[in-house]
Amino acid sequence: MTDGTLLDTPSRLLGSPAAGSRRVASFDYVVVGGTGDLTFRKLLPALYYSHSEGLIDGKSRIIGASRSELSGDDYRTRVVESLKRFLPASDYDEDTVASFVRRIDYVATDATDPDGWRNLAAFLGEDDTKVRVFYLATSPDLFGPICQRLKEAGLVSPLARVVLEKPIGRDLKTALEINRQVGAVFEESAIYRIDHYLGKETVQNLLALRFANALFEPVWNSRYIDHIQITVAETVGLEGRGGYYNRSGALRDMVQNHLLQMLCLVAMEPPSHLENEGVRDEKLKVLRALDPICGQDVIHRTVRGQYRAGAINGQAVPGYLDEPGIEGESNTETFVGLRAEVHNWRWAGMPFYIRTGKRLPVKASEVVIQFRPVPHSIFPGYGNDKLQPNKLVVRVQPNEGMHLHLMTKEPGPGGLRLREAVLNLSFSDTFKQRFPDAYERLLMDVVRGNPTLFMRRDEVEAAWRWCEPILDGWEEYSVKPKPYMAGSWGPSAAVAMIERDGRSWHDDAAVGR
Ligand code: BG6
C-alpha cells in the first residue's frame, strides 16, 4: 500500500510544513549495524530531523542492534556525540536531542548466531499494529542470512519491512543470490533497496522538470538533443573504507547504482502516474535498452583511472595506493568515464557520457542536456558555429538548481550582436528553506510504504547485467586504471574519449559552481 505522495505537499513547498498531515504510522525502526559509520553519519541525523519536524509519533522507537555489548545509556551517549558531530551546529537543539534520544534504545545482537535475535524479539514484543523496519546497514553478504534469522526468530510481523543498503552484491551472480535469499523471507513489496541518490531533492526534481512542464518533453529526444552528460565528482578519497572500496571500485560503487539511476530518470518515458510501479517500470525499460559494452568496446567506450598524490583546494592528499587499508598493488579504479547509448526510438544514436571519480577538484553532481544547434542562422556574421546551442544544466549538488543557456541579443544600438546568457534557477534562493538530506525522505518513505524511490529487484539485476560485461572486458583486455593526479579531472583519456566524438565535457571550471 502506498500513500501515493511522491513529492512533498504544496504546503511544505511553500515553506509551511504541515507536519500533522505528513506524520507517519507508529513504527519500530531497527538499525542492524547500529554502531556503524553510516548509522551515526547519516541514518540517525535523518531520523533526528524527522523527529524534530513532528513526523514521528510518541509510540515510535529506534533500536540500534549490533554485536557490541553496550547498554541503552551507552548507546544514547554515543548517539548524542554523533549528532553533535554530524549535525550543523544551528540544527542541534538540546531539548530536541533530549526528546529524540528518549525514543532510542539498543539491543546487543549477534546477527549470525541463531540465538542472537532472542533479546531483540523480547524487546520488540508482539505488537502487530506497528510498522517494523529492519534497516540492514551491514555487509551485503549478511543480508540473506540476517533475513533468515529474522524469520526463525519470528520477527517478521505482518507490517515488517527490510531496507537493504547498496551495494546489492558485487556482480550479477551475488545480486541474484541476495535477492533470492531476501525474497524467500520478505515479499518484494516489503523490500526497500536504497539508492540514496533517488532521495536527493534535485534528482526528484528531474521528474518535476520533465513531467510537470510541457516545455521540455517535445524536444527531449535525439532529434533535438545532441548528447547528455552525467557527472558525479567527489573531492573525498576513501574515508576509512579502504577495505570495502578496494574490492569494489567506482563502477560498482557509483555507476551501477547512482549514475545509472540518474540516467534512467533522464531517459525514461513518462509513466502514466507516480503511484504503484509506474516509475520503476519505466526505469527498468531504460536499463534493458542500454546498449551492452562488451569485449573490445571497453577500450573505446570506457576509461578507468586511479588517483595519485596531488592537492585539492591547496591541501596535499596521498595517492590511492598510500591510503589506509590499501596494501601493495591495486587495479581498483577510482574514476570511470563511459559512453553509453540507450537503444530505443527516443534516444537511438545519441550518446550519454558518464563520469565519476574520487579526488577530483570539486564535489559536484550534475546532468547536462546539450541541445543541437539551430538548423539555419539568419544572423549576419553568425554562422551556426557561432550560435551556441542551448544547454540545460541540472545541478544535483551543491548549489542545487537549473541553468538554461540561451542565445540573446547584446543590448546596444548598431548591429545585432548575440551572446550566450544563462537563465538561473537557484533552489535555495527560490525556496529559502533547508534542503532535507536524501536519507530523511527515504527512511520515512519506508514507513509510509512508498517504494517509488527504491530500486526494485529487476532493476538491480538489469543494472548488474549491463555493468558486468564492462568488468569482464577490463579483465579480458587487461584494461588497467590510468593514473591521474588528485585534484585533476581524471585521466586525459576521459577527455580524449569525448573529443573523439567531436564533443567536450561541460566546462570543468563551471561544474558545481
Ligand atoms: C556512496 C558511495 O554510495 O555515495 C561513496 O559508496 C560515495 O563512495 C557516496 O562517496 C557519494 O554520495 P554523496 O551523497 O556524497 O554524493
Image (cartoon, helix red, strand yellow):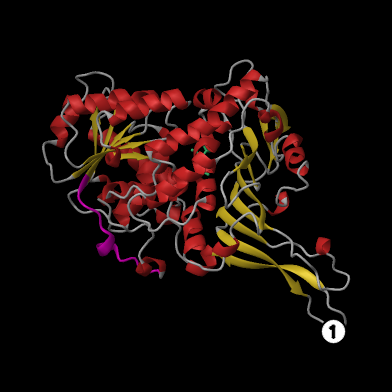
Q: Nearer the viewer, residue 136 or 372?
A: 372
Residue 418 point in image, percent of width and height: 80, 72
Residue 35 point in image, percent of width and height: 35, 32
Magenta portion: prevailing SS class? loop
The quarter of the picture where residue 385 lies is: bottom right
Residue 306 point in image, percent of width and height: 66, 29
Check if residue 258 falls in the magenta segment.
no
The quarter of the picture where residue 220 lies is: bottom right
Q: Nearer the viewer, residue 38 or 511?
A: 511
- Please tell me how crowded label 1 is: few (under 14), some (14-19), or many (20+) other residues with Cα within 10 Å: few
**Apparent side of residue 192 relative to residue 317 in the rendered image (left or right):** left
Residue found at x 54% / y 22%: 325
Numbered range of the magenta stretch: 15-27
Ligand 1 has an atom within 8 Å of the beta carbon of the residue at disc 1: no
Q: Give the residue pinned by disc 1.
A: 413
**Apparent side of residue 117 relative to residue 220 in the rendered image (left or right):** left
The disc labelled 1 sits on which kind of residue? Pro
Residue found at x 54% / y 27%: 468
Q: Residue furthest front?
A: 345
- Residue 165, placed above or below residue 381: above
- Residue 383, placed above or below residue 453: below
Decide if residue 279 is in sight here.
Answer: yes
- Residue 479, placed above or below residue 363: above
Decide if residue 238 is in sight here.
Answer: no
